[in-house]
Image (cartoon, helix red, strand yellow):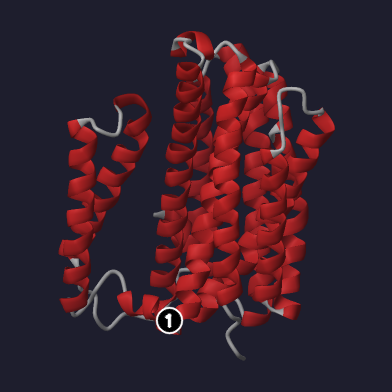
Amino acid sequence: MFSPIGIAIVTVFLPSDVKGRALGFMATTQGLGFCVGPILGGFINAHFGWHGIFFVNVQLCILAIIASWKLIPDRQPLLEDKRIDYKGAFLIFVCLSTLVFALNSISTMGLKNPAVLSCFAVSFTSLALFIFQELRSPNPILYLELFLKRDFTAAVLSAFSVIFVYMGLIFLFPFYLTIVRGIDIVRAGSVLMIPALMVIISAPIAGLLSDKVGCRPVCIFGITMTTIGFFMFSMMTVATSINHVITSLVLAGIAIGCFLPANNKLVMMLAPEDKQGMASAVYKILNSTGGVFGIAILPLIIMRKIAAVAAASGMPMSEAKAHPEIVMSGFDAAFKFAMFLCVTGFVFTVLARDKKS
């Protein structure tokens, strides 16, 4: 609920010539959170247990409530039509919640599990009913005509691809560091700080450039760096030097820091002025869904590959996980799949043109 409103506030209350810089600053603060989170989380987990991580969040939430109450402007145009499409809201909630549950349950329950299959069926049925409801509703919560614009659709799909691979990477990399490389959890948190630091550095520059030269060139640069980064990830082995690992993480951080602010601005520019909040919600829904897909599917690829290699060697799965080279084969398959998605995202990014002034 919070995230899309934050983007909409920036696009509504700031002039167009500084929106890129503002969105870049938002990405910087997010990068700072990603930077502090793994280090602080690793420290708390090592010394106080994982429950302490959630206790810290309580204080942060209280500060966010106070800051939002004091600082967010309350002036806005009054809506003539204040009706809400409750049927559409219910259907999209059912669609996304069952989809998230099914994706997160594949690795533990299996794809053929009746509960997983039922959730997929409910999700797809709800999606079809939702589309039908929104097409006939006088006040839809999702303006489907936005997707008739090729540039808008290409821009959000490119963001979906990038978030898919990046969130999958952030989720998987601690396991690579601890299982394959044998690094302790605190040091692993420090290594994961690298891409977040790169986001902090690159996001403001990317936001400024998107105001000066347009969003499309910056997005193309970002997705190109993403593809190169995952190519380097796919080249890693058990014996890969730490410099190679760090360089790959640096490229991934620069890529996401350059891509997201420019792409975010592009999506909002391509939406009608009276649909800014809705466009922001669409953008965040697809981003969140992309993150869920990345966190669910890439580990599934790893497990399937490890199982296949173990079966070929006549080794039980429990024993295979103790062999770093076998585990690495799973990571290799996941990174190559992610690189394929990066190429797909590159195509969408090229198709998304800047809106003419």
Residue at position x 47%, y 55% from top? Answer: 287
| 9, above or below 316, in the image | below
Q: Quadrant of residue 273?
A: bottom left
| 113, above or below 79, in the image | above
**Do we see residue 264 in this rendering?**
no
| 175, above or below 84, in the image | above
Question: Can you name the residue that lies furthest to the bottom here?
Answer: 357
Question: In the picture provided, is 92 more to the left or to the right than 335?
Answer: left
Residue at position x 47%, y 35% from top? Answer: 301
Can you say which quadrant of the picture contains the C terminus? bottom right
How many marks the image carries: the answer is: 1
Q: Quadrant of residue 82?
A: bottom left
Residue 142 in the image: state x and y as whole percent. 30, 70
Can you say which quadrant of the picture contains the N terminus? bottom left
Residue bearing the label numbered 1: 149
Classify mark 1: residues with Cα within 10 Å, few (<14), some (14-19) or many (20+): few
**Do we see residue 304 in this rendering?**
yes
Question: In the picture provided, is 111 more to the left or to the right than 234?
Answer: left
- Judging depth in this view, the residue of 110 and 259 nearest the camera is 110
Question: In the picture provided, is 23 more to the left or to the right than 241?
Answer: left
Residue 7 in the image: state x and y as whole percent. 52, 64
Residue 140 in the image: state x and y as whole percent. 24, 73
The amino acid type of the residue labelled 1 equals Lys
Residue 316 in the image: state x and y as whole percent. 44, 10
Question: In the picture provided, is 121 more to the left or to the right than 270?
Answer: left
Residue at position x 63%, y 73% from top? Answer: 19
Residue at position x 53%, y 63% from top? Answer: 158
